[in-house]
Amino acid sequence: NEGLVCALMCIRYLVVRVGGGFGMDYGMVTRPMLNYMVLAHAKGIPGPFPLLFGEVLDPEVQQIEVTTGSETLGRHMATLAGDDSGNTIWFAPLPANVSFPYELTAYNAKGEVVARKSIEGPREDGVLPFAQIP
């Protein structure tokens, strides 16, 4: 799929060329688990949009899930992929007809939630800190 190849090239550029932090300021975050960006669907541009992607910053993150507000469109597991420098990027293409908010959840190897964030809009980016969630 040409759109997927294009999106992956964009992700690789942002992670490798610009840096995994995309110029983000982590501020007072003492244990960042992952960062993220949203690429919204744009009319006339082919590809797997909307697309959530980022870099895994803590090796405890083993799985990432995006849940949409629609029960029929539901849960989407992100793909995690390592690169030659030992970094791990992740991406989750979503159906074009999903709407905000999205729930972004990171899990450890035991399936426990280590970070969670509600994403409210198409131009959002940030970092998810470690969160002890019962």
Image: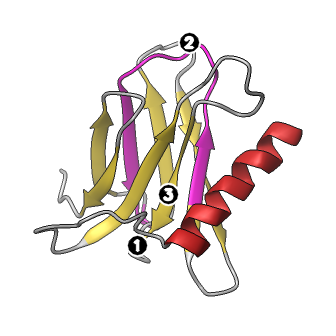
Q: Residues within 10 Å of mark 3 (few under 14, many from 20)?
A: many
Residue 11: give x, y in percent of width and height. Answer: 63, 57
Farthest right residue? Answer: 1
Q: Can see residue 80? A: no
Amino acid marked by disc 1: Leu
The tag on residue 57 is: 1
90 lies left or right of 84: left
The tag on residue 54 is: 3
Amino acid marked by disc 3: Gly
40 lies left or right of 120: right
Callout 1: SS: loop
Asked if the residue at tag 3 contacts the one at tag 1, i.e. Cβ–Cβ closer than 8 Å, the answer is no
Task: Give the residue displayed 46% in from the left and 67% down from the top.
Answer: 56
Which sits in the foreground, 130 or 57?
57
Query: Which colour scheme appears in the figure?
Result: secondary structure
The N terminus lies in quadrant: top right
Question: Alpha-carbon distance for marks 2 and 3?
Answer: 25 Å
Find the magenta span and give its range: 90-110
- Earlier in the chain: of badge 1 and badge 2, it is 1
Task: Give the residue displayed 49% in from the left and 52% down from the top.
Answer: 64
